[in-house]
Image: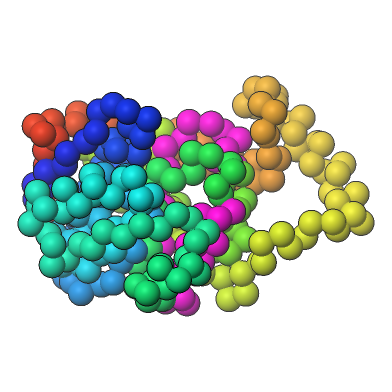
Amino acid sequence: MCIIIEQRPGGDDQDQATVWDCARTCSAWFASDSFPKDYWQGKRVLELGAGTGLCGLVLGKLGARVTITELPELLPVLEKNVQLNHLQDHCFVKSLPWGEHNAPPVQEWFNTPYDVVVAVEVAYSVGVHDILVQTMAAASGPQTAIYVGQEHRWRDVDAWFLEELDKSFNLTTVPFDQLPPAYRSKTSSVYSLTLKASPLPIGAGEGEDARAEQEQDQDQEEEEEEEMVLGPRDPFHCPKLTKKLQQLALEKSKLEQHHDLAPAPLAIQQVGVVFFGA
């Protein structure tokens, strides 16, 4: 499979209009034999924070009907990439600022629940986690498969994001040995999520002073233990889920002893990204 991507290598929005490594990892996984043959055929997919649209374009090539969403200023990049890959019948570009899924313009096309929701490299700022998760939950139903890919840049931001996801979703980590070897990276994770039967409302638990007092001593003990293992934390530290992250780090360390996890080089033409085996 060959996907042609045009990046925007400059300007204020250059981060959004760039192919990130984790997008390549997720795209290669979607196109691998980890999924049954014709699994994607006819699936209704919503991609959030699509950037250049790599993941959505790959799924479109595999037969899905993909709504690829971004902020308004990034839509020209997405529309160009859909055209470059001749996927106008499978990929549809829409504006969707997170948290605005109930706005009238969005409601005209936001037909939920989707079969699959994809969000890759979206947890870059703590300030958007809550509205991102709100939109993810609004797009999902009990049978929706949600896939989230994330490169680990800031330990505390990762922990905060996982905590926010835990309010609405059941989360498991896709094992490294299920990811295509050429696209594995020790700095990235892919998560598989399902919507909880009764998602925790945004803001639930705030002001529960009695519970907070009971957990204070335990949190302090976990923080001290974490600093001994992982080093000092930054001002945005979130103590919850620390043990889970430590366990994931240990699992990755074991896998690294048995696999070559160096990221595969990105093949660049215009940019051209080539996946083999699908």
List x then y, in percent, for residue 114.
37, 72
116 or 247, nearer to the observer: 116
Q: Which residues are magenta?
A: 130-159
Q: Is residue 260 left or right of residue 195?
A: left
Residue 128 spot, x, y in % from top left: 55, 47
Which residue is located at x 35 percent, y 67 percent?
116
Looking at the image, is 72 positioned above or below residue 7? below
Across and down, in percent, residue 210 comes to 92, 56
Left or right placement of residue 85 versus residue 147 in this view: left
Q: Residue at x 46, y 35 (%)?
A: 152
Depth check: give the residue in front, 157 or 84. Answer: 84
The x, y position of residue 15, in whole percent, is 36, 33
Residue 226 appears in which quarter of the rendering?
top right
Q: Is residue 142 magenta?
A: yes
Q: Quadrant of residue 200?
A: bottom right
Res. 196 image quadrant: bottom right
